[in-house]
Image (cartoon, grey):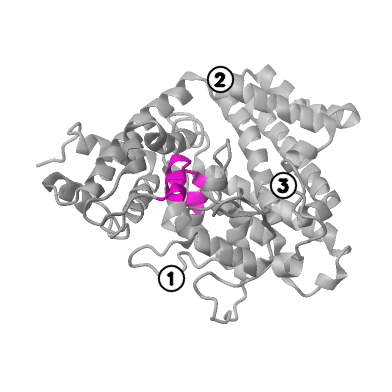
Amino acid sequence: MKDVGTQKMDWARLLSTRRLGQENRSNGREDRTEFQRDYDRLIFSAPFRRLQNKTQVFPLPGSIFVHNRLTHSLEVSSVGRSLGNDVSRLLRSRHPELEGTHFSEMGSVVSAACLAHDLGNPPFGHGGEKAIATYFSEGEGQFLRDYICPDTGDGLSETQWQDVIHFEGNANAFRLLTHHFLGRREGGFVMTYSTLASIVKYPVSSNQAGEKGKFGFFESERKHFERIAEELGILRLPCEGDGVRYVRHPLVWLVEAADDICYEIMDIEDAHKLKILTTVETKELLLAFFEGEQRERIERRMDTLEDTNEQVVYLRSCVINCLEMECVRVFVEHEDEILSGCFNGALVQHIADRPRGAFQRCVEVAFQRIYPCKDVVDIEIAGYRVITSLLDLMIRAVISPQKAYSQQLLNRVSPQYDVRAKNLYDRIMAVLDYISGMTDVYALEVYRRIHGIHVPNM
């Protein structure tokens, strides 16, 4: 983050129960807090349920159960709640002026945001994100860069083009939660401003994404984010051109930490279950987080467990607890920098030397041994083929809807997706909504049916 001088965000303003789409409606009286309602609204939603059939890293389970997007999100939410609650507890004595505000509900905000952080991810894991982006940047979709619709005379603006060539699951989650889909209510899920802001990991427009191509909201939802940021007092950064840049909402750091912790450590446990890592290797990786008497105590406790998998589970729980406490400490110690928008790097990059080194070793092993393994690569290759094929068919259908085959394709799309919108950008985004919302299983089924590989019973 850039240095924003003496400006500083205010907790009382950052934690708001104002809801997108219901700004002028007063909150009713319920036993649940507004942030708990956010959590409940998410967990009972169809997009959240669909995460059970979306790949996390490894292919969906056969005889061995590994994590999918749903189990990952639930675990991240659990860790996020602990992070938020502990930070709130430790900072309360520092901020007596916040007594009676929503400051004590920080854990609920983080928990809900964690639950939603992967809602926008397409099928087939991170490979699905790459497949969508590269379809436009280096695949068949490149023709759209300079395409002008003959019926309406419109094409894609530079920012809209950046939206699609850098397709981002995080930005897509914000769209899913805020977009006014056909037949749905204004404001999308009608979430609180604070929960929505806590999801946006990269609070910049796509034309400010830089080399990594990371951004937090599509051009179609830019006004929503600007309204939320202004209401919450999130600091805006200077930038060139017509893009926008903001610092992160402080709770994004906790959502990111929960995701980092669960992603890396649970991948190690899954790799052990799938015998990609041996028991000895797994134990060494997890025990490396500890030293001295603490390590000896953990080893003694572990030795009382006869089942190897239970030993790994115990070690994993100890590591997550260690990382959670370290990230809380870092957040509290750097509160002023975080509120000023000048904190750099993820929380896990600032923890104590030993756990930081052990965590980095887990990351290295994941990239050397886990992500390149045949099963992971195979699902990414297959997913790339399925997604780019469906994308090409649907994009060409919305460009030429008058064609007979286009009409057949468009008729199988749910009416909530505006594939017949007036302008080109909205039609393309509707296609991305449709495909990114698919589960792995459904995407494969649609692919087979469209290509005649599987024909319904006559």
Using the numbered discs, state the Cα–Cα distance from disc 1 to disc 2 in whole angstroms: 48 Å
Location of mark 2 (residue) = 275
The type of residue carrying mark 2 is Lys
Mark 1 residue element: loop
Q: Is residue 241 above or below residue 268?
A: below
The answer to if 163 sits in the magenta stretch is yes
Mark 3 residue element: loop
The secondary structure that dominates the magenta segment is: helix
Q: Is residue 376 above or below residue 348?
A: above
Figure quadrant of the C terminus:
top left
Q: Is residue 371 visible?
A: yes
The type of residue carrying mark 1 is Glu
Q: Residue at x 60, y 48 (%)?
A: 202
Mark 2 residue element: loop
Location of mark 3 (residue) = 1
Q: Which residues are magenta?
A: 157-173
Foreground tag (2 vs 3):
3
316 vs 272, left or right, is: right
Using the numbered discs, state the Cα–Cα distance from disc 2 to disc 3 in whole angstroms: 40 Å
